[in-house]
Amino acid sequence: MKKIIEKFLITSIFVMIIVSTFLSMINVYSQAENIVKIGWGGTSFDTFNPFTTYAQVSGWATSDVYDTLVRFDKTYTKFIPDLAESWEMNSTHVVFHLVKNATFHDGVPVTAYDVNYSFYLASQPWSRLSPNVEGVEKIDIIDNYTIAFKVKSPIIFMFMAATAVPIVPMHIWEKVSDPSTYPDYPPIGSGPFKVVDYREGQYILLQKNPSFFRRDWIPNVDKIMIVFYSDVTSASNALRAGDIDAVGPYVPVAVVNDLMNDPRFAVFKVRPVLYFYMAFNMYPEGKGNPTLRDPVVRRALAHAVNVSYLAELAWHGYAQPLATVMPTTNIFYDPNLKPYEFNLTLANQLLDQAGYKRGPDGIRVSPNGTPMKYTILVPSNMPELVRVGQQIALWWSQIGVSADVKAMDTGSMASIIWTKVDNKTTLGHDIDIWDWFVTPGDPTILSVFLSNQVIMGTSDSGYVNPEYDSLYQKMLEAKDLDTVKEIAWKMQEMLYRDLPYLPLYQVTAPQAYNKNRITGFDLDWPGGPFGGYDWTVFLKIKIVSPTTSAPATTTTTTGLTTTTSFTATTPVSASATPIISTSATQVATTTTTAAALPGISVETSLIIAIIIIVIIVLGVVIWATTRRGKAS
Amino acid sequence: MILGSSVKKFFKDIRELWIIYKNNRLGVAGLFIVLFFITIALLAPFISRYSPEQTDPSAYLEPPSFQHWFGTNEVGQDLFSLNVYGARISLLVGFSAALIAVFIGSLIGLVSGYYGGLLDEILMRITDFFLVVPPIILMIIIGSILGSSLMNVIIVIGILSWSPTARVVRSMVLSIKEWPYVEAIKALGGSDKRIIFRHILPNTTSVIYANMALSASNAIFSHAAMVFLGVGDVNDLSWGMILHYAFASGALSSGCWWYFVPPGIFIVLLIFGFVLIGFSLEELFNPKLRKI
Amino acid sequence: MSSRYSRYVVRRFLGAIIAVFAILTINFFIFRILPGNPIELLFRNPRLTDEQIRALEAQFGLDKPLIDQYFIYLINVFQGNLGLSFFYRQPVTSVLMPRMINSLILVLPSTLAAIALGIVAGLISAWRRGSKTDVSILLIGMSLYSLPTFWLGGIFILLSIYYLHLPVSGMLTYGAVYSSWTDLLIDFLRHFILPFITLTLVMFGEFMIIMRNTLIDVLTEDYVTVAIAKGLSQTKILRDYALRNAMLPTISIIAINLGLVVAGAVLTETVFSWPGVGRLIYDAILNRDYPILQGAFLFITISVVIANLIADLLYGLLDPRVRYG
């Protein structure tokens, strides 16, 4: 009888092993339908409501569900007509002529009233777009298909508002009692895609809108599924397993080599839209360590940070040191600035001369007695940033500065940075390391350094400089692009000198896709095709036909070599984007469409599956107990 | 004088315990495992060849070699040194959290068992509550609210894991209370405090030691789990932190076994050591189990 | 006797109700001492003016005194209203429910399998206590008990990368169109097997040790000694005396250790990205989504309390001795 029990144990272990090997041998991926699946491992989807969403993926997934008046092309300097088929500008007004055959997904035509209502919603204080439409003074509906905006600066309006405000149906939104908490599912837009399914934490399914008014924008594929993963690592695993066709917003550096060595995948670097920085709390009324308000201290600290080393440490060839507050893809980027030189002796000298003497514990003390002890706040969802913070603390310890790295979730970080004292927002931290995603055609990032931004909860440096504020106003009222650029450069030079931020590095993150499966899209869009910026990728993407997989393989090889060679060099320039030629322009052919199971949801079938498993397990137990009786 | 005699009694107890204990081979093995890790933790600066904090971008995720016995991690730190230093935090957490847990647990068990009545009822309901509530979730929530310094983590683990000790001590006290000699002292007018601490507590030591070892193993596990999930102080070089980075950086998914396997083995071994000690001590006081 | 049992039932019920209230209270107050204003966390819009914040606070009842808020909270909970998720902008219940089902799909079979294996192994170990088999089973049990769940999961991920090539995240291949039932089932099983083995093994260690100790207690009882003396067969003794009598304490101990199951599930789901409540808790910690954390905590603790209550009642019904205790 012992034997039987032992046998039972051994059998069950064997069964497990056999079952797992059996399962590992079969593949059931039926990618039969004309559907492209893109994995997303970044910040998860939050809401469809385009006025309250803050997640990159939410805006991206609906970028072709809602139309805007005009769109950016990939240079972010030219505008492509969308709902507006043409427009005229003078120095105070922009007039848009809307296309006449546009309809929302529910069949209702799009008119100037919808545009007006959308801008009204965008200007509400709870809307994330309210800063974008600040320059709008008056909106006039001329007729059903003509609308005029009176604005401070037409060029700024085009860059910040016309391209950003999604046009939503007035007949639906005006009935919503509280648009600030409206989940907007299913979203009704007028774009080339509709949302047909959404599962929280799982996926969004987009389906092409065949009646879209711009025939050349009609998507090549029937359906696009954006699959959510908890992190980029799981998303990359899914790519390797063949579950998905591409990964965004990036693949982790640790798996890049594995993907490159796999002939199925194309790996490439994207043009940077993301950069990391270190902010010093220099707010005169702030609660942080007051020594940071001394410009000499900030300069000394900047000289004690090796930004090239940090870029390499954190991203291993996928980041470049940066000297200003925006990445190189931004059209207002100032190329004349170079990072502060890494020189610990110089840093020590600066502090010595300014009278910061070392105390008995080796930590410097300011002339009026404040020790140079700082806390560096770091968001915990990016593990490499913790490493960066710790490395900076190591360097600073050599110039007599003590720094303690504290990692926390971004919510807690924000509540420490923007603390309320007597109902007034002030800055409560010393130093933080964080990131900004910067839209390439948008100078808004410069507004972070305005004097009133602490109260708004956007400035984490507390930079207060009236001269800077007036420059910003001038920029918003500038009438042509060159003037805007000139002022933006001046502002960046001021920031470089005053060091509210010490920019660290911009990220040219690697992205990857399965080139045996998809093709047709651009790789040089800022942020990459799968980074949450490229609205054309959904329209252009095609499925590689199975018969033409051979030429696709050739492209791969070139792609691979390009990518590898770029890993070796780290030039800082906007053109430094390796481009895999997407010459494989196979026509997508619909392969055999497998019939979906009629009428039974996945949940139901899983519940059935679990019942079966429970029955099997119970059966085994009962079998084991009764067999013992018979055996003796 | 009282202190001196109780110290002497303490050592006598330990000696007696050791005489029985040393016959339990598994228990002795557990003791050796724990002692081994204590040695490593104390000698960490002499054993490791690199500073655990030293980064090196050029030594990126290198597999084990003669330079780096356990390979390197994604920022080029020497994993052998990190693992050696990791023993310190785990042991610290294990011992201090276990002390807190056992202290609270024994106190509540003693009071509850000795006085009985309504007090007992209330204390036991509280104990049940903490026994039933999944501690790890509460730990994560409280840890993420309180902030993640090592001290907080230790306190949270300690405070949330005293209930098993309280239960066992209480049941011991209930039976000791009925012993004739305890009742005799009570009849002679011995104060409650004296009876509890001089006559009952010494008889529960073996249970308390057993629970101490089990609590330590629990604390090490809980700490590693919390840190792994990202609720912990990032500046602590603990085994859980190595695992956290191995998982979060994607090194695990790209198959860097040298990064992920060793710290786990060390955690398992250390917990195993404490578990062996705990179960052996449990067998000592439970005569039915002792018949091995 | 029946009055005694009903008194026992009443006491247990009272205990459970008190526990539920304690959980609700703890749940309410823990999440009120958080840093940051909930309105600001919910809207994440720095441009809200103070008046708007106050208006929203009034809308959510946050302007009332704490004790009023507490009662409002209690009423809401009993109406199944757990608030709005900061992150998903949806009612917490509608986020939690599907996750709950997914969790059960993983946890239920694993727990059953672990109990089954634990009973069998504990039985062998107890019956042959002191032998080499016992020591080796005990050692296996203890080492499984010492295994950190997430590490074991990671080891399976490594194995999968090098040898098994099984999927290591999710529950199904999302977006796959299945041509038949078997395809779906196989796809599900491929995702299911690794988390299932992980969770089963971790719990097996614990259950096996519990079972062994309980059985040893039972096997040293007089009636078993008598049965052995009578020369009854091993099987009969084990099945009719030992197993039957050991079942009860095992059930109650397992009920008490349900917290362990939950902990194991949270860690397993995190490692394997299983879309259950555990993974939701992990994501909620990352996103600081307190309503979700609060809701998940409430769900889990109350279900553990109820499971315990059921176990207690069953125990009392089946074992007359308990009622006197």
Image: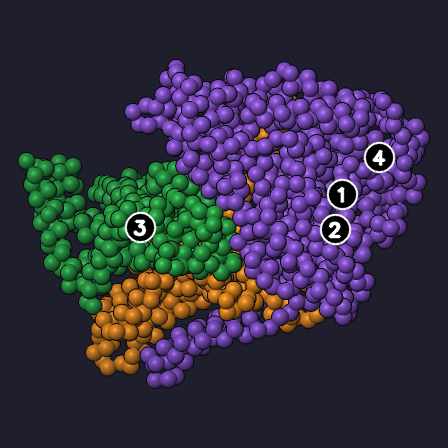
Q: Secondary structure at mark 2?
A: loop
| Residue at the disc numbered 2 | A522
Between the residue at mark 3 and the residue at mark 2, the CA separation in whole angstroms equals 50 Å
* Amino acid type, mark 3: Ser
User: Whole-Å distance between the Cαs marked 4 and 1?
Assistant: 27 Å
Image point 71% across, 39% down: which residue? A49
Whole-angstrom CA distance, mark 2 to mark 4, is 32 Å
In the rendered image, which residue does mark 1 sit on?
Answer: A74
Query: Residue at 52% of width from left, 34% of height from top?
Result: A433
Label 2 marks a residue whose chain is A
Which dot marks residue B48? Answer: 3
What is the display colour for chain B?
A: green
Q: Are marks 3 and 4 on the same chain?
A: no
Q: Quadrant of the N terminus of chain A?
A: bottom left
- For mark 3, name the chain: B
Have a look at marks 1 and 3 and say if they share a chain. Answer: no
State yes or no: discs 4 and 1 in contact (Cβ < 8 Å). no
Task: Specify whether disc 4 shares its chain with disc 1.
Answer: yes
Disc 4 or disc 1, which is closer to the eye? 1
Colouring used for the render: by chain
The letter of the orange chain is C
Q: Residues within 10 Å of mark 1 (few under 14, many from 20)?
A: some
Q: Residue C190: give x, y in percent of width and height.
A: 56, 67
* Front position among marks 3 and 4: 3
Q: What is the drawing colour of chain A?
A: purple
Q: Is residue B288 left or right of residue B190?
A: right
Residue at mark 3 to residue at mark 4: CA–CA distance: 68 Å
| Residue type, mark 1 in image | Lys
Depicted A439 relative to depicted C141: above or below: above
The residue to which callout 4 is attached is: A114
Looking at marks 2 and 1 on the same chain, the residue that comes earlier in the sequence is marked by 1
Res. B91 in view: no
